[in-house]
Image (spheres, helix red, strand yellow):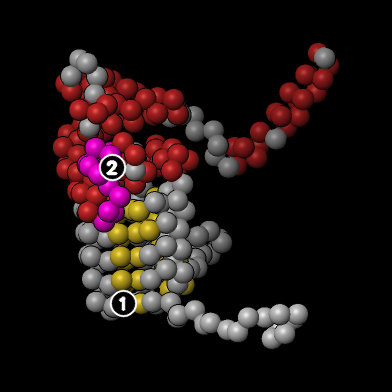
């Protein structure tokens, strides 16, 4: 066994040059996934103290949050993030209202907080977006991926999402990096706000340019619709389900899929 371990260790070392080329070794401390999970639990406790807060109170939870966040981000970013907590909470309260007011099955705001995946994913997204705006690398993506794994909703932390944002059901929703979403927007399950194609530099690397949709205020997009590219969906528009959309839509549009066609019943292969 000693000889096998020696050979495998030598083989692993032999490919270290490729690891260096990919810059996988940062030379600095890496984020702790476990610490980030604990940080999100404390963010949840601070935002929703009546539901998830500790017995010691919100001040203690904020102090503990700062203590956990500081080694991951540095003291300046940790302090700046703590100052953003009231803004994050205010936006999340609008998201709760949006979900509650768009789903007759909701019996109370408490049900939305406890049971609806949209609020879990928006808690992670709004936290991650704030950290990204403060200049935090990598960690925002880890936070949104934690929510993605738990809910099936994939929101890039760099996307810009306004107030009163709602997602009904949510499974399979994808919101790309350069999306811009206004206020009072509602998405249903399976909606993709994605890129249509990519532009490359002279070395063949994808360029960081706006490539995802803009949804203006008061837009509703129904299930399993894909809106691709840097297109604008005008305010107060309704986009129906199962639509593939790659062009701008003017304000106030109702865009629906063609109605299903009823055909005579087939038997013994007839009509095929």
The image quadrant where one finds the C terminus is: bottom right
Q: How many marks?
A: 2
Nearer the observer: mark 2 or 1; the answer is 2
Question: At 67% across and 80% down in the image, what residue appears?
Answer: 266
Indicate the secondary structure of the residue bearing disc 1: strand
Report the span colored magenta: 102-113
Question: Are the two marked residues, 2 and 1, in contact with CB atoms closer than 8 angstroms?
Answer: no
Q: Position of residue 149 (x, y in %)?
A: 48, 40
- The numbered mark at residue 1 is none
Indicate which disc, 2 or 1, sits on the residue closer to the N terminus: 2
Front residue of this view, candidates 235 and 263:
263
Residue underneath mark 2: 112
Quadrant including the N terminus: top right
Is 12 situated left or right of 154 in this image?
right
Tag 2's secondary structure?
helix
Tell me which residue sits at (31%, 36%) in the image: 114
111 in magenta = yes
Q: Is residue 116 left or right of residue 88?
A: right
Q: Is residue 143 left or right of residue 237?
A: right
Give the answer, above or below, for where 183 lies relative to 157: below
Q: Position of residue 82 (x, y in %)?
A: 21, 31
The residue labelled by disc 1 is 254
Instruction: Tell me how far mark 2 sits from mark 1, CA to CA.
Output: 29 Å
Q: On the image, which quarter does residue 225 sit in? A: bottom left
């Amino acid at each position: 066994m000693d000889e096998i371990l020696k050979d495998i260790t030598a083989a692993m070392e032999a490919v270290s040059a490729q690891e260096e080329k990919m810059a996988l070794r940062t030379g600095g401390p890496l984020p702790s996934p476990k610490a980030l999970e604990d940080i999100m639990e404390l963010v949840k406790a601070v935002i929703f103290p009546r539901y998830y807060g500790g017995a010691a109170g919100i001040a203690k939870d904020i102090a503990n949050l700062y203590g956990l966040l500081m080694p991951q981000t540095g003291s300046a970013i940790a302090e700046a993030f703590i100052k953003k907590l009231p803004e994050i909470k205010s936006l999340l309260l609008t998201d709760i209202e949006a979900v509650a007011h768009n789903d007759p099955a909701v019996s109370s705001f408490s049900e939305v907080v406890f049971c609806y995946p949209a609020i879990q994913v928006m808690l992670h997204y709004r936290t991650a977006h704030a950290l990204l705006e403060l200049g935090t690398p990598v960690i925002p993506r880890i936070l949104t991926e934690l929510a993605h794994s738990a809910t099936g909703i994939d929101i890039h932390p760099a996307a810009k999402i306004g107030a009163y944002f709602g997602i009904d059901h949510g499974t399979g929703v994808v919101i790309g990096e350069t999306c811009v979403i206004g206020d009072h927007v509602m998405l249903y399950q399976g909606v993709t706000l994605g890129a249509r194609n990519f532009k490359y530099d002279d070395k063949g690397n994808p360029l960081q340019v706006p490539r995802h949709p803009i949804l203006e205020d008061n837009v509703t997009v129904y299930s399993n619709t894909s809106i691709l590219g840097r297109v604008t969906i005008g305010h107060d528009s309704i986009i129906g389900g199962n639509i593939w959309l790659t062009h701008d839509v003017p304000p106030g549009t109702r865009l629906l899929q063609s109605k299903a066609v009823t055909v005579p019943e087939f038997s013994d292969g007839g009509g095929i």
